[in-house]
Amino acid sequence: MANPVPSPEDMLTCPFICPQTEAGTDNKQVYLQAGHRRKGENPYASPYVPGLIKPPEKKIYPPNAPPQYLPQPTDSTSGDFLGMGPIGPWAPGHVNWTPQAGMTGVRPVVDKYSITHYSTGEWRRHNLYMLTPKATDKAKALDASIKNDLKNAFDSLDKKQSDTTDTLKSRVKDMAYWKKQVEKALNAMKHEIKTLDADRAKLKSACRILMLPEAISRECLELRTHRYEPDLVRDDAEQELIKEVAIVGEIRRVFQETLAKVETQMAYNRAAKASIESDWSDKMTSLKVDSKNLHMTPASNLILHHPGSARWTENATTLEFWEHFCKESIRNCDEVRQKSADLRADLMTAIIKGSQDMKIQADRTNYALGETVAATEQLCAKLEETLKDNLQTIADVEKLIDHLNDSLREVNERDKLSGTRLQNRNYNRPNVENCRDKAQYALMGEAKFVKETVDSLNGKLREAEAVRAELMKYRGQLEREIACKRKSLNIDQDRLARVRAHLPSPEEFANA
């Protein structure tokens, strides 16, 4: 594993003595966007301008001149001095002096060779002096020493490079593992978003389907208002229909609240998906970079010199923070996904339980309507039977009235007979013969009894006619009541049944 990269503040302190972070604080890195620079960075450009360097000029030496590193006939005795430009052997290639020149690494490099001590002629004479053999044994010893040092140096380099390669292999394995974990979390989140979107569509369809049972319940209540006056009662069926409308309203409220929660959770899911996708993209890029570095060798044709690359970058993070970020990224994604799964369970529970409650309430309403219809049918049958009995009673009373009239006619004949007898005896017997004999008393008693009988029969006749009038009135009431009950049966048994046959089932809500 690679060592954690120190921040710019850490470079100003000793990493082995001074603490890297304060206790109780998080080591968070702040990344800059492309084209931005931090405060304190060098804002000044180098004096070097492309095109400043001129092509080399070939020097001309006299014929039969010695090699260039040996004294030449054209050497001057006063020495040749080089001018100091923006690029020279004493400078790093550009002058980058800034007000922060007191910091190490920003002042132009100036060492003991920055001032010319010798001329080129003196240098060549020195070369001639040095080329004169003087230390052969020292040269052989130096050759052996250098070869030994080179062997040790290359052995150390090979060992160091092998260790670095092993570290890169370990790093690639770690990156591949975390990339796989992030990819697994990303796929799970994608599937969760797709599933939640499907469940949201089901909930919206359930909200639309919910309009049907509410319309059916309200239409049933409206139809029941068309019953006739005696049957306009707040019976159990009416109560259950009102409760059905209330339950539909409560279910709609729950559906709307759940839909609002789903919309909010969908926004969280998309944000978590974008975050985990960004992490996955970063890990893919890093994995490709480390895999490419792992397969590079000194014989690779893609390697170049990169001056200044052996330094910690400003946006580098520590290994501990990297591992913490990987775990937290996946954990945050899993937490959002778990909340979404719980909400989906609540959503389906609301749909299923709501549809089941509506089905139970519909069964209760149908049961109450069935009981009302059964009671109304029984009452209607009883009323029809009572009407039939009433009609039979009316017929019997009418026969009785006819019999009373016949009896009155017979009594009237007897009354005529007794009256005629008395008339004949009262006005046709002469003088003393018109006496109050027993026959006269008998005729008088008969006349009185006939009169009383006529009065009694007339009273009976009036009573019979009054009873017949009451029976006729009762007959009209029974007929109106039967018509009312048949109207109620037509509404509750026929029209409500056809309307309530379209009530949606729980399966239609679940598969909406």
Image (spheres, rainbow, N blue to C red):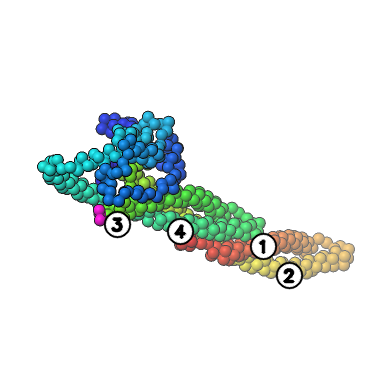
Q: Position of residue 347 (x, y in %)?
A: 45, 53
Relative to the observer, which residue lies in front, 297 or 502?
297
Sequence-earlier tag: 2 or 3:
3
Q: CA distance from mark 3 to mark 1?
A: 110 Å
Mark in front: 2 vs 4: 4
For the residue pair 15 and 85, the one nearer the viewer reads as: 85
Three-letter amino acid code at the position of disc 4 = Ala
Viewer-side residue, 494 vs 339: 339
Image label count: 4
Residue bearing the label numbered 2: 406
Q: Quick one: label 3 or label 1, which is nearer the N terminus?
A: 3
Residue 78 location, quadrant: top left
Residue behind mark 1:
480
Q: Which residues are magenta?
A: 297-301
Q: What residue is at 62 percent from the left and 58 percent from the top?
A: 222
Q: Mark 3 sits on what residue?
A: 301
Q: Picture quarter containing residue 231?
A: bottom right
Residue 42 shows up from this direction: yes
Q: CA distance from mark 2 to mark 4?
A: 91 Å
Query: Residue at 25% across / 56% down in the picture?
Result: 299
Residue corresponding to mark 4: 198
